[in-house]
Amino acid sequence: MNFNQIIIQITKVSIAFIFTLIAIGSLASISNSIFSDKVLNEFNSKSSDQISRLKLELTTTVKSLEFNKKRIPHTVVGRKELLEQIEGQEVVIESLAYLSSPERAREYLKNINNKLKDTEDALLHSVIGRENLIKKINQQKAYIFAFKKIMPSSDLASDLSLSEEVSSDESKDLVTKEKKVIIELPKLSFEEELALASIDAGAKLSKKCTACHSLNSAGGNRVGPTLWNIVNAPKAKVDGFSYSASLSSLGGSWSVQDLNLWLKSPKKYAPGNAMSFAGLRKIKDRANMIAFLNSISDEPIKNNGLN
């Protein structure tokens, strides 16, 4: 092999080596880009979930506080504990007020935006621990972005920029498909609904009863027995009315709890009885109906029969 051939071989090897390095560098760059996008997307998703959970906590606490305040006039036993619970709920609502007030949200956003700038300044002057600072910056940017997306004020985003140093590419990296969180208000128990029950709403529902029952003191029995004084009355004991064997065998009185079960499904409560009424599916409707039934009485029971 002469000298020229040796040079050609060395050149070919060198070119192949250079192309190999370029390929490896490109793959590494793509890999890092994919990893970076994945990390940023995870940061943003976690931030959105965190803020959504806090908003859910605020919503449920506000609902519970409103209910507890309505309970105060009707509560004797356990009143001190109820007042303490209300006080604690008010503290929670105050601590999360920035999630419902645009003014408080702006103030909160200023604070977290300033923290981001402090972290970015620290990165400029740091040699050790740069990876942790970069991670923290990405987390802060993701949180600010998610906060601005979820907050109620439409002009909040125009009041404050994410960060003057954030490029459009960086902002694009932070954008992920926002997870929609359906906030469901807590369901109230029968006792809670009964404490808040409306006699007027129950009176409207009672129109379903008038075809078979009288609702006044002088109405007497019809297809079904009169419902006057029915709350806490002995079961199947209205004078002058002939009851089915299934109702006659029950015993006990029509407490509010028993009326709740009866109104939910007469067929299930006393199988074989002659009543054709299907029942009231909603707890709130049954509570309103019982409040009305309690009102059509010579002596309505206090607190709708709740202890």
Image (cartoon, rainbow, N blue to C red):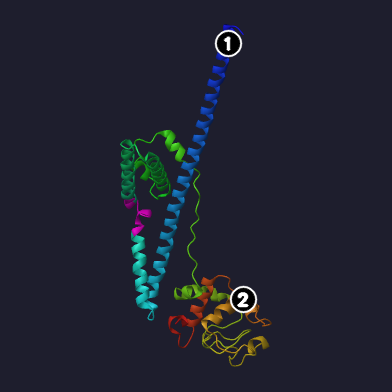
Of label 1 and label 2, which has the lower sequence position? 1
Residue 256 — which label? none
**Residue visible at 37% across and 70% down?**
85
Q: Which residues are magenta?
A: 95-104
Closer to the camera: disc 1 or disc 2?
1
262, above or below 98, in the image: below
Image quadrant for the N terminus?
top right
Q: Nearer the viewer, residue 282 or 141?
A: 141
Disc 2 residue crowd, few under 14, some 14–19, many 20+, Cα 10 Å: some
Residue 265 — which label? 2
Query: In the figure, is residue 4 to the left or right of 200?
Result: right
Image location of residue 47, percent across then percent down: 44, 49
Q: Nearer the viewer, residue 214 or 83?
A: 83
**Residue visible at 56% across and 83% down?**
214
Structural distance between the alpha carbons of marks 1 and 2: 98 Å
Image quadrant for the C terminus?
bottom left
103 inside magenta stretch: yes
Kind of residue at disc 2: Ser
Name the secondary structure under disc 1.
Answer: helix
Q: In the displayed image of the protein, which residue is found farthest to the front?
A: 1
Q: Which residue is mark 1?
A: 6
* Residues at discs 1 and 2 in contact (Cβ within 8 Å): no
58 inside magenta stretch: no
Image location of residue 260, percent across then percent down: 55, 78
Residue 302 in sight = yes
Q: Nearer the viewer, residue 159 or 3?
A: 3
Kind of residue at disc 1: Ile
**Residue visible at 31% across and 46% down?**
110
Disc 1 residue crowd, few under 14, some 14–19, many 20+, Cα 10 Å: few
Name the quadrant containing residue 81.
bottom left
31, above or below 306, in the image: above
